[in-house]
Image (cartoon, grey):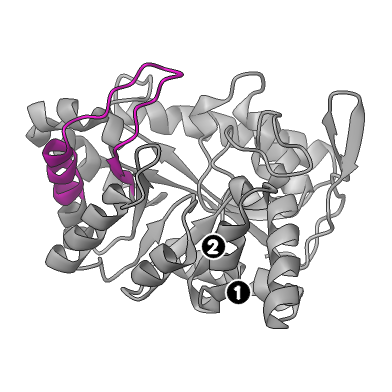
């Protein structure tokens, strides 16, 4: 891989203001990006901007139930088209092309699809096994437990036992195939017992953490919750929500997480970080999150921010490549 980009995307706009992107202290890896879900931009242009912003690795996702593709080959052809268009644009702009050889995807059914998954489990598992044969497929995800009632989209949580069975089936698939898994865990509003995390912890204890690795994606909980999972050897991925002013507890968890277990992600197009919160998020924006959390950790723990950023990069490479 080349040591530095030839050009660098310097600013991101929010309304009429421009915000300068921090120069990356290490190569950037976005370990969870929904390229299929953008509202007002194309994946190709977002990938080209990411290349200019110092992103050198990216993991996206394919959900055979939720995504609008007829089959896995249809998704795979679409991804190839987006990568080719992004590479062409980045080459015209004089950006590093490293990213385009380092995009991977995970295949899995989100807990929103748990009922559908269990109604045709064997068929969906066949699709996931097909995806795992692809050289760009790096694991299973996002799977997990979502006990939250989504009032914005009027999505009622599936019965907890159904979600647990869906998670267990896909967790077993990851272990059988020697690949890592990314978990989506969300509790219902006001649930101080953090039931989704408690149930997921029990499942991992009973079935074992996949030897290839397990990631808690988009971690938005407190330090005691984080400690339980990195005590199991899990990786914990932090996104834009960790930069929000009210989320001191997430930053505390990040500062205490072992360096060999931290990851960064955007979860784009959702939850753009400060100072551009509220815009449609994209991978190029991950530098804001890395910079904010690395410096916050440096203040709390006395660690060099560049070493924190480098550790997250090395963790991502170890997990997905």
Where residue 253 sits in the image (x, y, percent)? 53, 66
Q: Name the residue rendered at 11%, 32% in the picture.
A: 118
> In the picture shown, does residue 61 fall above or below 132?
above
156 part of magenta stretch: yes
Range covered by the magenta-colored residues: 141-170
Res. 112 image quadrant:
top left
- Please give left or right for residue 290 compared with residue 72 in the image: right
Res. 40 image quadrant:
top right
Where residue 250 sits in the image (x, y, percent)? 56, 58
Q: Which residue is mark 1?
A: 311
Q: Which residue is mark 2?
A: 263
Please tell me how crowded label 2 is: few (under 14), some (14-19), or many (20+) other residues with Cα within 10 Å: many
Asked if one can make out residue 166 in the rendered structure from this viewpoint, the answer is yes
Where residue 270 sits in the image (x, y, percent)? 57, 34
> In the picture shown, does residue 184 fall above or below 111?
below
Nearer to us in this view, 270 or 9: 270
Q: Name the residue rendered at 40%, 59% in the picture.
A: 215
Quadrant position of the N terminus in the picture = bottom right
């Amino acid at each position: 891989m080349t040591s530095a980009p030839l050009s660098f995307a310097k600013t991101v706009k929010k309304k009429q203001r421009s915000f300068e992107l921090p120069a990356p202290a290490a190569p950037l890896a976005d370990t969870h990006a929904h390229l299929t879900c953008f509202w007002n931009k194309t994946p190709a242009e977002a990938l080209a901007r990411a290349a200019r912003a110092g992103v050198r690795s990216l993991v996206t996702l394919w959900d055979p139930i939720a995504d609008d593709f007829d089959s896995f080959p249809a998704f795979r052809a679409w991804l190839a088209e987006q990568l080719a268009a992004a590479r062409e644009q980045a080459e015209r702009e004089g950006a590093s092309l490293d990213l385009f050889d380092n995009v991977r995807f995970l295949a899995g059914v989100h807990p929103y699809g748990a009922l559908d998954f269990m109604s045709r489990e064997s068929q969906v598992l066949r699709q996931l096994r097909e995806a795992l044969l692809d050289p760009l497929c790096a694991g299973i995800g996002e799977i997990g437990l979502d006990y939250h009632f989504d009032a914005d989209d009027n999505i009622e949580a599936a019965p907890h036992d159904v979600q647990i069975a869906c998670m267990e089936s896909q967790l077993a698939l990851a272990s059988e195939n020697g690949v890592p898994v990314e978990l989506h865990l969300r509790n219902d509003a006001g649930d101080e017992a953090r039931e989704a995390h408690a149930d997921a912890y029990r499942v991992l204890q009973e079935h074992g953490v996949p030897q290839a690795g397990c990631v808690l994606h988009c971690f938005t909980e407190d330090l005691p919750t984080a400690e339980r999972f990195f005590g199991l050897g899990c990786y914990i991925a932090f996104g834009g929500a960790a930069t929000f002013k009210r989320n001191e507890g997430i930053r505390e968890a990040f500062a205490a997480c072992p360096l060999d277990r931290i990851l960064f992600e955007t979860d784009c197009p959702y939850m753009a970080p400060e100072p551009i919160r509220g815009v449609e998020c994209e991978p190029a924006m991950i530098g804001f999150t890395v910079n904010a959390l690395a410096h916050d950790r440096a203040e709390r723990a006395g660690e060099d921010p560049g070493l924190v950023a480098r550790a997250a990069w090395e963790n991502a490479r170890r997990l997905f490549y």
